[in-house]
Image (tube, helix red, strand yellow):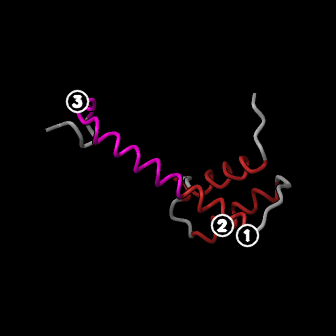
Amino acid sequence: MVELTEREIKIIRYLHIMQNPQIANVPFELKNNLIQTTFLTANIKFNEEEMTDIGQAVNAEIRNITKDGLKFMDKHKGAFKGLSGLGMGTK
């Protein structure tokens, strides 16, 4: 099994909290505190600047994934015929 870097572990912990549907309605500040708590309990060092950097990078990548996926689906509409729920290829 591959060993994750400390930065990768921070990103996974960030995503686990921020994208967790069970706490979707929890205010951002509380989610931020939960992330910091997971770092503290795992003895992972962090600072506010790094937290902001990780958050911005993760959110930018999520936007890119969505944008690229939608572009691909639009370009290849015919490949998605019969796949209900996507709203594509049904006309």
What kind of residue is marked 3?
Gly
Q: What is the x, y in percent for residue 57?
A: 60, 57
Q: Which residue is label 3 attached to?
A: 82
Q: What is the x, y in percent for residue 42?
A: 82, 52
In what quadrant of the picture does the C terminus appear? top left
What kind of residue is marked 1?
Glu
Residue at 73% across, 47% down: 9
Residue sticking out furthest to the left? 91
Q: Secondary structure at mark 2?
A: helix
Q: Is residue 41 left or right of residue 84?
A: right
Tags 2 and 3 touching, CB below 8 Å: no
Which one is closest to the eye, mark 2 or mark 3?
A: 2
Is residue 72 covered in magenta? yes
The front one of 27 and 13 is 13
Tags 3 and 1 touching, CB below 8 Å: no
Q: Which residue is label 1 attached to?
A: 48
Q: Is residue 67 above or below residue 46?
A: above
User: What are the residue bounds of the magenta stretch?
Assistant: 60-83
Report, in whole angstroms, how far the alpha carbon at label 2 lies from the one at label 1: 6 Å
Circle 3 packing at 10 Å, graded few (<14), some (14-19), many (20+), is few
What kind of residue is marked 2?
Thr
Q: Which residue is label 2 attached to?
A: 52
Circle 2 packing at 10 Å, graded few (<14), some (14-19), many (20+), is few
Q: What is the x, y in percent for residue 1?
A: 75, 27
**What predominant SS class does the magenta segment belong to?**
helix
